[in-house]
Amino acid sequence: MPIFAQSTERSLRVSRPVLAPAAVPADPSIFTPKLTRQSSTRRQPAVEPAFAGIEARPFLKWAGGKRQLLPQLLSRVPGAFRRYHEPFVGGGALFFALQARQQLPQGARLSDINPELVNAYQVVRDRVETLIVLLGAFRNEEDFYYEIRAQDPQTLDPVQRAARLLYLNRTCFNGLFRENRDGRFNVPFGRYRNLQILRENDLRAASRALRGICIEQSSFDALADCVEPGDFVYFDPPYAPLSRTASFTSYSRGGFDDEAQRRLGALVRALSARGVHVLLSNSSAPLIFDIYDHPEHLVEQVLASRAINSRADRRGKVHEVLVAAGPHVDSLRRRQASQPLSLSA
Ligand SMILES: C[S@@+](CC[C@H](N)C(=O)[O-])C[C@H]1O[C@@H](n2cnc3c(N)ncnc32)[C@H](O)[C@@H]1O
């Protein structure tokens, strides 16, 4: 039995989750305790939602996710900045870490070129309760998996598309959502026993962290118009391949070729010259040292644990490159002179 009735609505603006009962609250703010009339004189003990103590973290496991590199990234975040931008958001590891540390008082803009990913962020932010109800009906079974995998996201409404992505991401082999060159998801079923498909309080915590955050589908090329001096941008693009056969560049249709890496390098230089704080991660490919070789950049090699290789014998620590540019570079250099920044995970 198909889990979704085929929606006739194709527009992103229309969202009619087929399985959502009428009583499902679409607005996560219902979990914010409300003051009653009585409480204006005598305060009731606050009713904490079940997810109140849960730290928001990535709700998707994404190729190139940065959880392993967080200590090194966090030690290179500027002490103070205006708005935060993450234009290759993926799983958003640094965003969630900064939000948990309350380091984003001036808000943030998250973007990515992948439409399914961006839709999932928007649904988790705006319609988490409907999403939870829908995901609750999903089963970790092989036939069911292939049925969901075969669906064309274009025929689903936004909540259904987000549920499909979260479900495939958790239950697929290796737990990584990766599309092939034609933009199709063709990873086989993961056969994981005792898998919890729905971690509802984690989703609610992520939803709370995303409240008020601007989330857009766009290429990094569009970023220059949205950034002001004093803002902080973290770029985590698809990595330049270390060898021409090891290709980690097909996160999305079209991949990310050398020319795109050079365009990104030019953007980093332009933004830092305008007083924007920039941090970028990439592989230690010669191309990256070439692009970021500039006296005003701080280029460092760090050691990161990488479990992305499907062959266990090829997993382990690899060198990656962090580039800092813009006004915070001076203070990073001063700090580094007195107390070396974290270089390994
Ligand atoms: C290395 S991943 C980011 C991982 C993320 N930092 C994390 O912690 O999970 C790279 C991301 O870049 C996105 N991407 C690829 N080409 C892009 C482009 N031209 N503009 C914006 N995003 C792009 C991919 O969809 C992918 O989500």
Image (cartoon, rainbow, N blue to C red):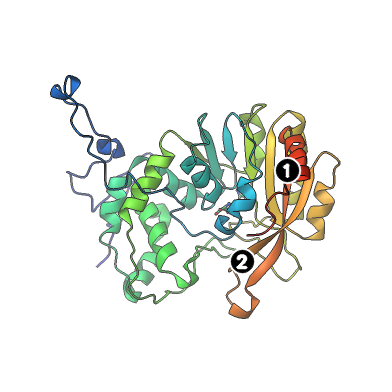
Secondary structure at numbered mark 1: strand
Numbered tag placed on residue 306 in the rendering: 2
Left or right: where does residue 150 sit relative to residue 19? Answer: right
Q: Which residue is drawn at 57% across and 75% down?
A: 310
Q: Residue at x 62, y 73 (%)?
A: 315
- Identify residue type, mark 2: Arg
Left or right: where does residue 191 sit relative to residue 315? Answer: left
User: Which quarter of the image is occupied by the N terminus?
Assistant: bottom left
Q: Mark 1 points at which residue?
A: 324
Judge whether residue 12 can be spotted in this image.
Answer: no
Characterize the local packing of mark 1: few (<14), some (14-19) or many (20 or more) Cα atoms within 10 angstroms.
many
Is 191 or 203 nearer to us in this picture? Answer: 203
Q: Residue at x 65, y 36 (%)?
A: 78
Structural distance between the alpha carbons of marks 2 and 1: 22 Å
Characterize the local packing of mark 2: few (<14), some (14-19) or many (20 or more) Cα atoms within 10 angstroms.
some
Secondary structure at numbered mark 2: strand
Where residue 293 appears, as percent x and y from the top left, is 84, 47
Q: Where, by quadrant of the figure, is residue 5 drawn?
A: bottom left
Where residue 32 appears, as percent x and y from the top left, is 27, 35
